[in-house]
Amino acid sequence: MNTKKMERKILYRAFFGCLILFSVLSGCAETPTKTESAYLFERDGYKAYQDHRWVEAEKDYRQASNLDPLNLKYRNNLSIILHREGKEREAGKILELGQMENSPAGEHILISRAHTLLERHQYPQAKEILDGMRFSRSWPTGFKRLMAYADIRTGHYGEASILLHEIIQKRPRDPVVLGYLSIVYKKEGAESLAQKNFQRALELSRSSRFRKSLALLFNETDSGSKNAP
């Protein structure tokens, strides 16, 4: 074999070798990662959710969650879908406190979950979530107010009183806190303080809905009701 044929053969081999390598690398580049696959499932799941196709949405979000288990958004959305399907117990397990409380995003989801439970009048479940987070760090006023609300709704007026008095020292004109205090004082038999805080809450609140709710429930408290606005 002469030199030219040898060089030609080497060039052909190098050329085809490059083609094979390029094909392999292209194939690898086109294979989505687990995170990318999870995103695709989440996208399909969200579309199914918008169309009220709960079963399909659940399936897609389960896939997304399995592929990217640290993504709290997927777990939160899956929990919402399970609620839509009436699977309350399973939905709650998706957002287990021990798995989420050490993450800022997880804390946000748990607080939203507790807020939703309070709106649905599922007070013990909401209090359980909030109690698990109560001493994890120093919380802002909004969270403490939410905890006090859950305490009142479940009849834990002593715990609510401690939180509300702590808040009122820093926010003496907070109508919601004053309103909650009026309920606590009423339950404690401190009629004068109850009336004073009740009237002050009505004066300071800009929400007609809150004023109406507070007035109704404050009056019910006279007959021994344990409700709060």
Image (cartoon, grey):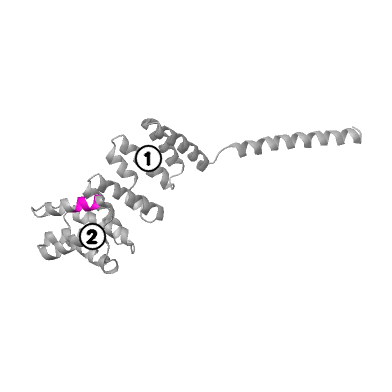
Residue drawn 14% across the image and 62% down it: 195
Q: Earlier in the sequence, mark 1 or mark 2?
A: 1
Residue drawn 74% across the image and 37% down it: 18
The Cα–Cα distance between marks 1 and 2, rounded to whole angstroms, is 42 Å
Secondary structure category for the residue under label 2: helix
Q: Residues within 10 Å of mark 2 (few under 14, many from 20)?
A: few
Q: Is residue 218 left or right of residue 18?
A: left
Residue drawn 40% across the image and 56% down it: 104
Q: Position of residue 19 (x, y in %)?
A: 73, 35
Instruction: Identify whether 36 is placed above or below 197.
Output: above
For the residue marked with disc 1, what is the amino acid?
Leu
Residue 211 painted magenta:
yes
Front residue of 112/98: it is 112
Q: Which residue is tagged 1?
A: 78
Q: Is residue 113 visible?
A: yes
Q: Which residue is tagged 2?
A: 203
Q: Is residue 190 visible?
A: no
Checking the image for residue 155, the label placed there is none
Front residue of 112/180: it is 180
Residue 134 sits in quarter: bottom left
Residue 142 painted magenta:
no
Q: Position of residue 211 (x, y in %)?
A: 22, 53
Q: Residues within 10 Å of mark 1 (few under 14, many from 20)?
A: many
Residue 202 sits in quarter: bottom left
Q: Quadrant of the N terminus?
A: top right
Identify the magenta region.
209-214
Residue 149 sits in quarter: bottom left
Secondary structure category for the residue under label 1: helix
Residue drawn 44% across the image and 47% down it: 71
